[in-house]
Amino acid sequence: MHYNQGFGEMLQCLLKGNGVPMILGIETSCDDTSAAIVRTDGYVIGNLLINQDEVHRPFGGIVPEIASRNHTFYLLNLIERLLEESRLGWKDIGGIAVTNRPGLLGSLLVGVITAKTLSLAKNKPFVGVHHLEGHIMAPFLSDEKHKAPLFFKDPFLALVVSGGHTALYRVNKFGNYNVLGETIDDAAGEAFDKFAKMLNLGYPGGAVIDRKAQSGNISRYNFPRGLGKEDNLNFSFSGLKTSALLQLEKMSDDEKSKNISDLCASYQEAIVDSLMIKVRKALKLYSLNKVIVTGGVSANSRLRFCIEKLAEESIEVVIPPLKFCTDNAAMIAYAGLKRMEANEFSDLSLTVSARSELGHV
Ligand code: KG4
Ligand code: ZN
């Protein structure tokens, strides 16, 4: 990342002193196209998103080529609409933040090239943002409907759990993270989606499984908790997937449909339990008493229930509203703003990367 002291000071002056406290965020790391405008205090002025679920549904998963092509169709229009709906012009934008890692390379490229072009055309500084750093900033966003927690300070534990990522971080302070554990194979959301595919429940399948599980028995089927007994803080969901496949192979279509709620509840419990085992272990091991959960799977009602229950053990819990948990450009804008406040900027040599370690440029 490029460091430019003079530019940074100028931007801080612009951001803080002269009434231009806004950053444009761009997120295109996967299949969601999103643009947002966020103030220096984390207040989200506008956050627009175009979801491609319908387009990828027939394929049972994301087709990278289609995702990136759609970003090229949507992104510029979305940014124009965002400015219009926010009643703002380019003069109000202090800088541009764009996700440049990790993600699908073609998708990331669309966002990064757009950010570079706008930076040149509109004469704005820009910065590349790590997608997971964006997720970690989600709890600190606010808008007219939602206030950010006032006294939630680092250090804290962050569980980032989505269709692409499942990881635990110790957040020491902004920009300083320890990766405590991560999945060694599938992400938790992927595990939900694959089970939904086995049951022909459509894509993405997490929300459907969550719904079907509501009336099911969580202990009817005995699915494994991958790495649950291991000392490390990593996750594994591939054994669960195989075990579920073997279970379904033993059942007729009629049996599957009669027992769908129990199947979903037991499978969901195995995922949530695997996550909770490691969250508890991490809190204890690192003497932390605060935890945030973010990423699309944080929508899961059973996971929310189990995490919120930690509050009974004097653990402070923050689960941001879903619109800030799932992929969105507001979290990217805010993370980018923090980077710019620390005098970190990118230049035209900024590249994209599929790698996911936080801190890797
Ligand atoms: O964060 P996200 O919107 O996109 C990325 O993957 O980065 O997360 C999407 C994932 C999908 O795998 C979807 O099945 C899962 O989040 N998901 C859920 C629920 N809602 C969405 N998983 C379990 N329960 C839900 N209610
Ligand atoms: Zn994400």
Image (cartoon, rainbow, N blue to C red):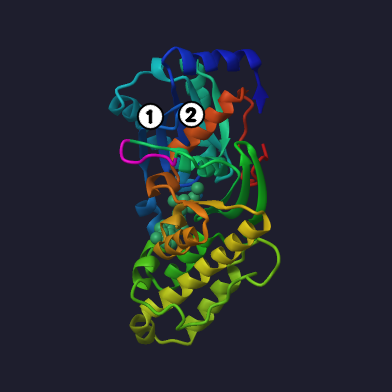
Q: Residue at left 53%, top 17%? A: 12
Query: Mark 2–mark 1 contact, CB under 8 Å?
Result: yes
Above or below — where is 30 with respect to 242? above
Q: Quadrant of the N terminus?
A: top right
Q: Which mark is residue 50?
A: none
Q: Which residue is mark 1?
A: 79
Task: Measuring from the top left, give residue 92's x and y in whole percent.
Answer: 40, 18
- Quarter of the image that includes the C terminus: top right
Find residue 104 and report its horizontal and vertical position in percent: 55, 46
Residue 303 magenta-highlighted: no
**Between residues 258 and 341, which one lies in front from this camera angle?**
341
| Label 1 neighbour load within 10 Å: few <14, some 14-19, many 20+ | many
Q: What's the distance in space between the residues labelled 2 and 1, CA to CA?
A: 10 Å
Task: Classify residue 179 as left or right of residue 331.
Answer: right
Q: What secondary structure do most residues of the magenta stretch adopt?
A: loop
Q: Earlier in the sequence, mark 2 or mark 1?
A: 1
Residue 102, how many percent across, how many down?
A: 59, 44
Query: Considering depth in this image, is 97 or 230 the residue closer to the camera?
Result: 230
Q: Is residue 203 visible?
A: no
Label 2: few (<14), some (14–19) or many (≥20) C-alpha neighbours in 10 Å: some
Going 48% across and 87% down the picture, which residue do you hit?
A: 250
Q: Position of residue 147 (x, y in %)?
A: 38, 39
Q: Kindly report which numbered mark, 2 or 1, lies closer to the viewer in this rendering.
A: 1
Over which residues does the magenta segment extend? 144-149
Camera-nearest residue between 258 and 20: 20
Helix, strand or loop for disc 1: helix
Residue type highlighted by circle 2: Thr
Residue position for label 2: 114
- Tag 1: residue type? Ile
| Relative height, residue 43 to residue 228 (above, below) | above
Tag 2, which secondary structure? helix
Q: Residue at x 45, y 38 (%)?
A: 150
